[in-house]
Image (cartoon, helix red, strand yellow):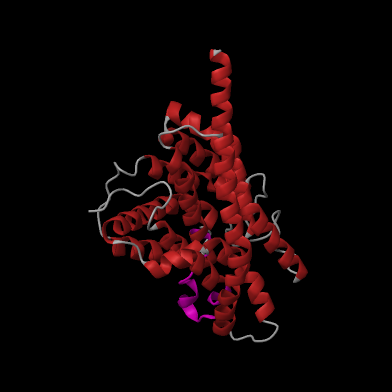
């Protein structure tokens, strides 16, 4: 049996990211053209909730047992996401996609939520150490349903229609659940094999999609309980990758999940000017994601790691110098 994952590389998470990102792509580009109930196979909102759980896990895992340097942390996170998101926004506007915006549009709404969570984490971390993640998460669930039930939703049951001021509240329980999983990774027990959790998660996501489109039960009401199921799936993937090794092909795709998520709709809009067959549009759109990942996202990721490490080193040096001065 392998040892637990290191803070720098948590195998299995990129598999989750890959599946979630591809589900969003297929839901947007293939789903509408698929016949009957097959159009509910691929889903968007449940995949985003899985992203939130993964994000909370990845943010908290390195800081389970050590302090947080706020400035390096925030610099690293915002260098990581803001330039790629800004580039995608500019491309979308150049393509005339006015609905691609961070205020009331799609795609970027979840990126705004992520930015809010990053800003809140330096406050959440010390609070969690006082009252515990379960209490924090319970409070967030109350707040989430307060917004969801108090404001309702649109005709599609979307959980992204409350504006940048409140969208993050609805998704916060999922993000905090990811933090809880990271905190307790070496203590949590999970029954069943990974394929059982994959199937249950996929079927549940599709069922929720069908319910949203055909009943009064919208995503805005079901995403909190689905986040628990997503957490179990994520935990199963981590355990399996730790014991047997990850699925390399999906891990590679997952490394580019942010680019896939940001760019697929923009690429599809460009491709559809030439061809309209959904399967071809989907394939070419995914192919066009790679240049964005290679030349925009990946350099930003590298720059974020370097900036964070440099700022942490400078902060340690500053504290050591202050200690020497104080001692003298």
- Tell me where residue 54 appears, x and y as whole percent: 46, 52
Question: Is 230 positioned to the left or the right of 288 in the image?
Answer: left
Residue 207 lies in quadrant: bottom left
Q: How many marks?
A: 0
Question: Which residue occupies the foreground of this view, 160 or 16?
Answer: 16
Say which residue appears at 34% left-offset and 55% top-offset: 238
- Residue that appears at 52% across and 63% down: 257
Q: Nearer the viewer, residue 303 or 110?
A: 303
Residue 292: x and y, percent?
A: 62, 67
Quadrant in which residue 99 is drawn: bottom right
Q: Is residue 227 visible?
A: yes
Q: Quadrant of residue 252?
A: bottom left
Horizontal side of residue 301 vs 240, given as left or right: right
Q: Residue furthest top?
A: 328
- Give the residue at x 38% y 67%: 248
Magenta-span inclusion, residue 145: no
- SS assignment for the magenta stretch, majority: helix
Decide if residue 130 is on the left or right side of residue 88. left
**Chain part drawn in magenta:** 29-46
In the figure, 188 relative to 220: above or below?
A: above
Residue 87 lies, in percent from the top left, at: 69, 61
The reply, left or right, for residue 195 in relation to residue 109 is left
């Amino acid at each position: 049996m392998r040892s637990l994952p290191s803070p720098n590389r948590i195998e299995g998470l990129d598999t989750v990211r890959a599946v979630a990102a591809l589900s969003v792509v297929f839901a947007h580009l293939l789903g509408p053209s698929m016949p009957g109930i097959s159009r509910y196979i691929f889903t968007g909102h449940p995949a985003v909730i899985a992203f939130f759980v993964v994000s909370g896990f990845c943010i908290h895992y390195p800081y389970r047992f050590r302090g947080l340097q706020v400035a390096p942390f925030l610099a690293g996170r915002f260098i990581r996401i803001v330039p790629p998101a800004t580039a995608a926004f500019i491309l979308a506007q150049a393509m005339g996609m006015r609905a691609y915006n961070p205020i009331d549009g799609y795609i970027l709404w979840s990126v705004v939520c992520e930015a809010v969570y990053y800003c809140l984490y330096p406050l959440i971390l010390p609070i969690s150490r006082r009252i515990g993640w379960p209490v924090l998460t319970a409070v967030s669930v109350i707040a989430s349903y307060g917004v969801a039930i108090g404001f309702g939703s649109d005709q599609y049951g979307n959980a992204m229609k409350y504006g940048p001021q409140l969208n993050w509240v609805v998704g916060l329980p999922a993000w905090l659940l990811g933090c809880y999983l990271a905190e307790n990774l070496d203590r949590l027990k999970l029954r069943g094999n990974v394929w059982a959790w994959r199937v249950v998660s996929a079927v549940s996501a599709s069922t929720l999609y069908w319910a949203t489109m055909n009943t009064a039960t919208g995503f805005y009401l079901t995403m909190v309980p689905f986040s628990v199921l997503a957490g179990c799936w994520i935990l199963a993937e981590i355990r399996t990758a730790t014991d047997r090794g990850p699925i390399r092909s999906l891990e590679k795709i997952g490394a580019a999940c942010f680019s896939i998520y940001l760019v697929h709709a923009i690429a599809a809009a460009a491709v559809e000017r030439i061809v309209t067959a959904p399967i071809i549009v989907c394939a070419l759109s995914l192919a066009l994601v790679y240049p964005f990942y290679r030349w925009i996202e990946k350099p930003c990721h590298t720059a974020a790691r370097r900036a964070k490490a440099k700022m942490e080193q400078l902060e340690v040096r500053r504290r050591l110098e202050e200690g020497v001065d104080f001692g003298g």
